Amino acid sequence: MADRQAYKIIAFGTNFNHRIGKHFGILFGVIGVELIIYPLSIWFERWRLDRGMIKAQREKREQGEE
């Protein structure tokens, strides 16, 4: 119910006294920032895991040489 009501307020401009209609720009801004940050955080986590695996392989090789 609330989702449908929020959509009507934002898309059609109904119920001008409602707070969601006044702040829809902020809502879209937050969504935009999240859409930018999410892929960056995934890339960073993947980079960190790959770096850890490479480091573990290097340590394993060094222990095998001893």
Image (cartoon, helix red, strand yellow):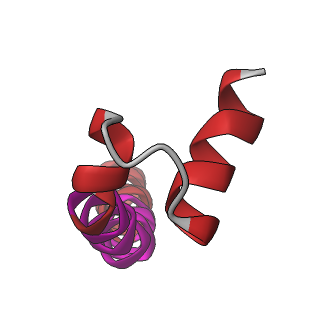
Q: Is residue 66 visible?
A: no
Q: Residue at x 48, y 43 (%)?
A: 15
Examine the image and state in which quarter residue 44 appears.
bottom left
Foreground residue among 36 and 56? 36
Foreground residue among 35 and 44? 35
Task: Check the image and report above or below for 4 versus 35.
Answer: above
Quick check: is 39 in the magenta stretch? yes
Residues drawn in magenta: 26-46
Q: Is residue 8 visible?
A: yes
Q: Residue at x 65, y 52 (%)?
A: 7
Foreground residue among 13 and 26? 13
The secondary structure that dominates the magenta segment is: helix
- x, y (%) of residue 2? 66, 24
Examine the image and state in which quarter residue 55 appears.
bottom left
Examine the image and state in which quarter residue 29 appears.
bottom left
Of all residues shown, which one is farthest toward the top?
1
- x, y (%) of residue 5? 67, 36
- x, y (%) of residue 47? 35, 72
